[in-house]
Each structure stands twice: as C-alpha cells, then as structure tokens.
Image (cartoon, rainbow, N blue to C red):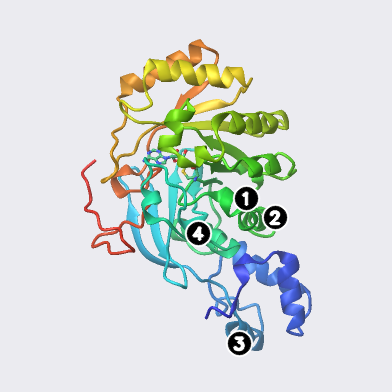
Amino acid sequence: MTEKTSLVGLSIAELTSFVTALGEPAYRGKQIFAALHQRRLRSFEEMTDLPKALRDVLNEKATAATLIVESKYQSTDGTRRYLMKTHDDLPVETVFIPEERRDTICFSSQSGCPLQCTFCLTAQLGLLRSLTPGEIVEQIIIALNDVYGAGEKTPRGTNLVGMGAGEPFLNFDSLLNALRIMSEPQGLFIVPHRVTVSTAGIVPRIREVAQIPDRPNLAISLAAPTNELRDELMPINKKWPLEELLAACKEFEETLKPGEHFTFEYVMLAGKNDSEEHARQLANLLNRHELHAKVNLIPHNPAEPLPYQPSSADTVERFKLILESKGVHAYIRKPRGRDIFAACGQLAARRENNNFQAIKQSMVAL
Ligand code: SAH
C-alpha cells in the first residue's frame, strides 16, 4: 500500500502528469482532481464517470484515501473530534467546529509534536512524523463528508485553522502544498484568506511567509511576556527568543495587505502568566516593537497530567482591560469541545481504553 501514490496530495498539474504517464489523456487529471476534492469521493469505484479499465489501473497504482477514522467524538456544543490513523498506524486528529455563519476545521500538520510546550498535551506524544500534503487535505475532506455527506455542498463557508497537533512551520513545504491544493476552484476552493496557521515562533519561516503572495493568515503563540517565563513554558524560545521573534513579526506585519489577519495567542494559565504585571509587560513588549496585532486570550484547557488550571473569568477580563488601556486590542476566545478533548492543547490521541503510544490517561471531568 505504501508504494501506491496518494492522489489526494497531488496538484492538478501533478495529477495530469500521473495520468499521462499511464497513457491516459490529460483531461483525466482534472477529472480525477475534481472527483477527489470537489465531489470528495474517497474511492475510485465511486468515480463512475471514469472507464472501468482506468479505475482498475488506478486501484493498482494509486490510492484515493489513506487516512482511516478510528473514532469520533461529539461535544455538547456541536464540535466534533476525529481520531484517525495513517497507513503506518500513527494518530492524526482533526476538529470540526460549527459556528453561526461558518464552519471551522482545525487540522493537524504533524502526528504528535516535537515542541515541548509545558501547557500542551500534544507535546507528550513527541514527534511521530510530519504529515504529507495528502494527509493534511484528507482531514478536511473526511470532516466535511462526515458532517454534510460525500459530495454534498457545504451550506456555509469553511474556515481552516492550522492549530491542531504539530508545528505547521516545521512541516512547511507540505503545509504550503496542501493549502495550494485546497485553494483550487476546481476542488475544495478554500482560499488562503479563510485559513489561519498558528506557529510557536519558527522565525526563519515567519520571514519566509512575509515574502509569499498567496499566504494564509498568521497567528503567533506567545504564552509569556518575558524570555525567562517563555523559556520555561515554550522551550523553542531558547532558540528564537522574544526580541528576535517580535522583530520577525514586525517584518511580517509590515507586509500585511487589506483583508489579511495577524494575531497573537496567549494561553492563560492560573497563577503562572496571568498577573496584572504580566499584562503590563505584554502590552509594553508589543508596543515597544510597534506591533498592532490583536491578542487572543485563550483560557487554558486543562488536561491531566498538565500542571495548570485556567485563569478565572475575572482574571482574564482584568488582563484584557490592562492590555486595552495600553492600546493593545484583545479578545477572549471561548473554548470549544473541551468535554471531548477537542480544545486547543488537548489533542493527544485520546480515546476510551487509550493505548496509543505511551499515552494512558483517564478522562478527567471538566
Ligand atoms: N504549534 C502551533 C499550533 C498548535 S497550538 C503553535 O504553537 O502555535 C495552537 C494554540 O493552542 C496555540 O496558541 C497554543 O498556545 C494553544 N494551546 C496549547 N495548549 C493549550 C491548552 N492546554 N489550553 C489552551 N490553549 C492551548
């Protein structure tokens, strides 16, 4: 199976080369692309507009789907979490979040994550491997098919956030390829301005994205206003400390075009990074770098065995008011899907009778 080509990860041009190499006419490339991405078909059998002989050849040489949904969890707030596995048995998680006027799908860029943020459960898996472009795109196809049915039109717009497991900027090429495939009008047609990618602060990639014309919106995870605290919470800070990170952010901000969004994320951990002094330090830091981006305050989503609790609603509100009194826009993000381990920082291949990798934890009441 592994030697077969996964067609979901190919662009129209690549798919066209693939079919012409099989001796087929070039237009079959576009036809198969539309079947995979616009009609969201997951098997060649269903592509009945292709000759039977071609479907047989495709079955022999290629795959229309590689991810398998292992389990699905649905939250009381409508959020759905999919725990899937790759052909080599690694966990991939995706979260579907219905909102009033749009749907948001949170996808993973890696199985596990190499970063060791102390407040994030995914860190405990370590990096299993980076996902291929096809595996990134398949997550969106699977979620949409589950919610609306294969091939059915989606009634609302779909936004994507690259905030699931993994560090997207450590899987940069596959991420950009996947986004390009998903933006095709003949496919899913989810354009870059509907996509937000979150990074823990891989500085060279932030600079690179600043030079890319068709790029997604960017979010930067801060979590702390000083190097001392950020080194502890997000060890990646030792490699690219705050001053360097924020200088790259400023470079990026200067390239923003109308309609593009740039935000900071700040996870609020009770008694750790949520004091009034932290709020003042954060505002001063952003002001010193002349950054105008909004700060999203994310109350911590607790999960055993993480050693933190969320800040109280009052504390978060006070933090926000201090930021705003210093001219920094702030927004409090409402957690979704906490009850099914679908919220930020809770993706760690959890399931009932969990025995994936080394993760064996009991469900905690939230
Ligand atoms: N590696 C990327 C993307 C994944 S994390 C990054 O670091 O940005 C997406 C967001 O979830 C980040 O802003 C992170 O700070 C936040 N997060 C991680 N663990 C969390 C938790 N337990 N509770 C709330 N937010 C969390």
In the drawing, does residue 133 fall left or right of residue 69? right
The picture quadrant where one finds residue 289 is: top right
In the drawing, does residue 255 fall left or right of residue 44? right
* In front: label 4 or label 3: 4
What's the residue type where badge 4 is placed?
A: Gln
Q: Which residue is mark 4?
A: 139
Q: What residue do we see at 38% from left, 47% from top?
A: 79
Helix, strand or loop at disc 1?
A: loop
Q: What residue do we see at 51% from left, 37% from top?
A: 237
Helix, strand or loop at disc 3?
A: helix
Helix, strand or loop at disc 2?
A: loop
User: Mark 2 near mark 4, Cβ–Cβ under 8 Å?
Assistant: no
Against 174, is 328 above or below?
above
x and y, in percent, of residue 143 in the image: 47, 57
Q: Which mark is residue 185?
A: 2
What's the residue type where badge 1 is placed?
A: Ile
x and y, in percent, of residue 37 in the image: 61, 63
- Determine the CA span between mark 3 and mark 1: 31 Å
Q: Where does the C terminus fall, quadrant-wise? A: top left
What's the residue type where badge 3 is placed?
A: Asp
Q: Which residue is mark 1?
A: 190
Label 4 crowd bin: few (<14), some (14–19), many (20+), radius 10 Å: many
Q: Which mark is residue 56?
A: 3
